Amino acid sequence: MKILLVLNIPPALEDDMVDYLLEMEEVRGFTSFAAQGHGGGEQLTVTEQVSGRRKRVQFEIIIDEDIADRVIAGLSTRVGKDIAYWQLPVSGIGHT
């Protein structure tokens, strides 16, 4: 089954994440973009608490579920910590 794997990371890990994903033959492509995290005040710096947001980078990958498990398994050792992720089922994929 195809899923959408979403990875949400600190900007400092962006280059390592790109390298990690590009090295995986099973990952044929992905999308990344700047994001803002809100909430989780105990993990925010004072500046982030004042602004009410935390800079993040989000990656989205459509892959087979078993490949997602392998991607997730290598995150902490190959990329770093403070990586949030979630998976969503994909009911259809196409291009026009």
Image (cartoon, rainbow, N blue to C red):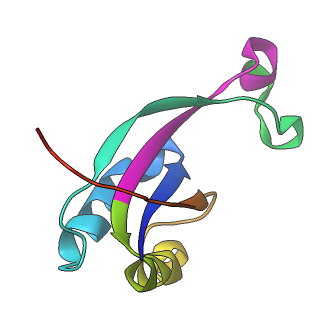
Q: Quadrant of the C terminus?
A: top left
Residue at figure coordinates x 20%, y 59% from the top left:
29
Q: Position of residue 23 (x, y in %)?
A: 20, 74
**What residue is shown at x 30% (from left), y 69% (from top)?**
20
User: As rendered, which of 45 and 25 lies closer to the eye?
Assistant: 25
Depicted 96 relative to depicted 6: above or below: above
Quadrant position of residue 65: bottom left
Task: Judge whether residue 65 is colored magenta.
Answer: no
Q: Is residue 49 above or below residue 80?
A: above
Residue drawn 17% across and 79% down? 25
Q: Position of residue 26 (x, y in %)?
A: 23, 79
x then y, percent, for residue 39: 81, 32
- Closer to the camera in the image, 96 or 61: 96
Please provide the residue range marked out in magenta.
48-61
**In the shown orientation, is residue 82 left or right of residue 35?**
right
What's the residue at 49%, 73% (across, down)? 75
Of the pair 23 and 31, the residue shown nearer to us: 31
Q: Is residue 54 magenta?
A: yes
